[in-house]
Image (cartoon, rainbow, N blue to C red):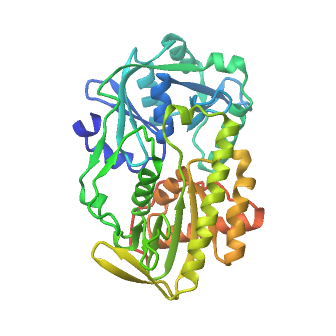
């Protein structure tokens, strides 16, 4: 496995949100890493490939904005990665260098920098790809134009036609570098340094028939980027009823964050659902998560302290004089469905008179990576809630520039 042979790559991958990471060896050859969500990786495995679209710059003939990489769980609305490319940039040089090879080693990592698949790969029509890259020009980098570039790329992809699909470059997966059906056991101390871990072994796999426990533990790992482990409670149980209060609870001296998480199995049948069915499932998850969030909020807001069950006995957790924030996390949301999806969570915010937010898993990953402290992350959630109150739907978080280093709050 690449991460075992070259563990130094993990520090660099930890700063990457999603996308490509070419790696050049001393002999000049390249391998390629793709960091993506588990749904992307399983789709690539099921299809034995994916497609790369060289997105034209509609304002400048002969010029491209970069790559859209599509993983076809659904033909009309596949999972996509955006990769803007710029003239003279190392990413353009190295990514083109990797893909120009007759074949290359390709490794897939998830948001937690876990290596989940390794394979030999090749661009099917390599000669055409090499010619296209030689003939295409790219813009020079301007950070002020980055948001507009993403919007232009997404707009073009949404309007693509059959000819555009035919011109896309198919990347085919070949022989595996190791077995697909592996399990990862994480025995590092940081995998257990939160309340409620109870020493349970942290096991992960790409395919997930029962998603709940996996996702909740992954959410804890994301929140650990910002919060200390002692502030995070996984599946806290009420002492009075023995029932779960919420999926994840975070309590600091300043804030109480209540998290309800909903996910779907990561299996081929789940990925192959129609878009309409996926929308219906997501809306159902949000409705249920919002109801559960309201129950947890009501319980906490009525008390100065709560009593939780723990393996060592009852534990009293002070919640008085703290800001209380609710958060519902779902697997994904579709761009044209944000208003409908936002409504149940905004209704809970109005009823409880507290900020309540809706994020998909990728958005939480992004925010926890770019806002790695309690104050930064909570302030980011407040800003998103303010936008939602103004526009009636939650926004997608966007960042530019290098990630902030994790640091204690001032």
| Vertical order, 183 against 177 (above or below) | below
The location of residue 55, given as percent across then percent down, is 64, 29
Q: Is residue 229 visible?
A: yes
Which of the 4 quarters of the picture holds residue 82?
top right
Percent x, y of residue 65: 62, 33
- Left or right: where 90 falls relative to 321: left
| Relative height, residue 399 to residue 184 (above, below) | below
Query: With respect to residue 110, does 231 lie above or below?
Result: below
At x 30%, y 25%, the residue is 177
Q: Is residue 334 visible?
A: no
Name the one closer to the observer, 3 or 249: 249
Name the quarter where the N terminus is drawn.
Answer: top left
Task: Judge by depth and name the residue closer to the eye, 168 or 214.
Answer: 214
Q: Quadrant of the C terminus?
A: bottom left
Residue at horizontal 75%, vertical 55%?
Answer: 339
Q: Is residue 255 left or right of residue 163?
A: left
């Amino acid at each position: 496995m690449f991460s075992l042979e070259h563990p130094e790559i993990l520090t660099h991958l930890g700063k990457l949100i999603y996308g490509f990471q070419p790696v050049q060896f001393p002999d000049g050859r390249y391998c390629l890493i793709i960091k993506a969500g588990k749904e992307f990786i399983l789709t690539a495995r099921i299809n034995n490939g994916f497609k790369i679209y060289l997105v034209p710059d509609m304002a400048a003939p002969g010029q491209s904005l970069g790559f859209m990489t599509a993983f076809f769980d659904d033909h009309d609305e596949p999972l996509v990665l955006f990769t803007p490319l710029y003239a003279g940039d190392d990413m353009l040089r190295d990514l083109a260098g990797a893909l120009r090879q007759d074949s290359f080693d390709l490794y897939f990592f998830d948001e937690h920098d876990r290596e989940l698949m390794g394979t030999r790969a090749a661009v099917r029509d390599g000669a055409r790809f090499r010619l296209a890259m030689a003939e295409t020009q790219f813009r020079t980098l301007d950070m002020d134009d980055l948001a507009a570039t993403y919007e232009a790329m997404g707009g073009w992809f949404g309007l693509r036609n059959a000819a555009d699909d035919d011109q896309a470059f198919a990347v085919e997966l070949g022989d595996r570098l190791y077995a697909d059906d592996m399990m990862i056991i994480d025995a590092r101390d940081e995998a257990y340094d939160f309340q409620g871990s109870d020493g349970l072994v942290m096991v992960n796999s790409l395919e997930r028939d029962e998603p709940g426990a996996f996702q909740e533990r992954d959410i804890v790992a994301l929140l650990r980027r910002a919060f200390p482990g002692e502030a995070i409670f996984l599946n806290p149980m009420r002492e009075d009823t023995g029932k779960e209060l919420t999926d994840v609870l975070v309590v600091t001296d300043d804030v109480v964050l209540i998290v309800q998480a909903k996910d779907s199995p990561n299996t081929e049948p789940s990925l192959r659902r129609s878009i309409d069915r996926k929308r219906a499932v997501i809306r159902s998850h949000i409705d249920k998560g919002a109801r559960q969030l309201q129950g947890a909020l009501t319980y906490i807001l009525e008390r100065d302290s709560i009593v939780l069950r723990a393996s060592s006995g009852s534990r009293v957790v002070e919640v008085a004089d703290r800001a209380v924030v609710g958060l519902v996390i779902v697997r994904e949301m579709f761009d044209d469905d944000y208003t409908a999806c936002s409504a149940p969570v905004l209704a809970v915010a109005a009823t409880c008179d507290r900020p309540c937010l809706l994020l998909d898993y990728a958005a939480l990953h992004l925010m926890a990576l770019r806002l790695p402290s309690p104050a930064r992350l909570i302030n980011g959630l407040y800003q998103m809630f303010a936008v939602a109150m103004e526009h009636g739907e939650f926004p997608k978080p966007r960042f530019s520039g290098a990630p902030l280093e994790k640091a204690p709050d001032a």
